[in-house]
Image (cartoon, helix red, strand yellow):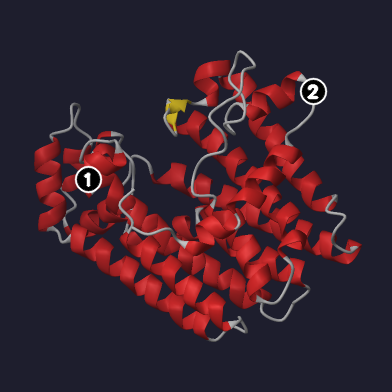
Amino acid sequence: MAEVEILSRYRAGIVSALAGALGGEGELLRLIRYPMGLEEPDGTPGPGIGGKLLRPSLVCFSCEALGGEVEAALPLAAALELVHNFSLIHDDIQDKDELRRGRPTAWKVYGVEQAINAGDGLLVLALRRALDAEVLPGTRRLAALGALLCATYRMIEGQVLDLSLEGRAAGAEEYLEMARKKTGALLGCALELGAIAAGEDGPRDRLRGLGEVLGLAFQIRDDWIGIWGDPGKTGKPVGSDLLRRKRSFPVAFALERDPGLAELLSRDPLPLEEALARLEAAGAKGAAEEEVRRYVREADRIAAELPWEPWAKIAFGELLSFLADREA
């Protein structure tokens, strides 16, 4: 797929802002720079900051779409990406994941205790970065900090709900409540922070709601990829999320229609081919695809009513298409 403008337009500025926020000396900063891709455990340079940088890109996009200057948004974009990475470090510990972006996770390298410290440090640096954003007036900094704190709390609520789903037959509605918080909260915050940076308070609530809808589309597509994605593009085998016992939208949907699936999914080893067949028989694959399309349509409707500049509506539509059809 061709390059997506929103994901490329701001990347260099975001990477620079993140590297600047993580400069300095001290053992804690060295711990933090490893999962951010900036440093290896032996102190040599890392591969660099990776990932799509979707959340910080949306901060910058939202600001520019409302007529603001991207420079005003960059400190808040960096702050949000630091919060996101704090959550990833702690998630990897809780989920016992050993790899992220092709490298051993922080807890595998430094141990659980030090990885917790790295995550905690990232959260504090994020909040400080928002509060110290001198390019913004003090009232805007406080508004940004408030939005960041609210979204972080909702994200953690989502993680609590996610862990509570493990080992029980939760339905689709319960799953969607979790995803709206765990994934949607930071995406909603991204668009809201952009409005704060631009000095536009009017659309903040609508932008936050748009981000939550976008988060649902993003997460359900992620769930689809985790089960039926092309191994050549994902680097993981078909059914990888089933093998990890991950609760996802397709599983929640199928369990409502085939309660006996819960026993099958609990077996060790998991009979993967049978599990995949049962999911498809329950209509979970098609339902996940339709749910993504439904949330994309809703996001498109909300975006059409926002006071964005024309180029921004075109760019956002491109992003929606990418997120709906992405394969990795």
On the image, which quarter does residue 209 sit in? bottom right
Identify the residue at image location x=12%, y=50%: 278
What mark, if any, has residue 230 been given in the picture?
A: 1
x, y percentage for residue 326? 33, 56
x, y percentage for residue 286? 19, 63
Which residue lies under the disc numbered 2? 25
Compared to residue 96, the image places residue 134 above or below, namely: below
Residue 174 appears anywhere in the view: no
Identify the residue at image location x=60%, y=69%: 208
Marks 1 and 2, how far apart in space? Answer: 42 Å
On the image, which quarter does residue 273 sit in? top left
For label 2, the crowd category at 10 Å Cα-Cα, with few meaning under 14, some 14 to 19 and many 20 or more, is few
Amino acid carrying label 1: it is: Asp
Amino acid carrying label 2: it is: Glu
Identify the residue at image location x=51%, y=46%: 159
Residue 273 appears anywhere in the view: yes
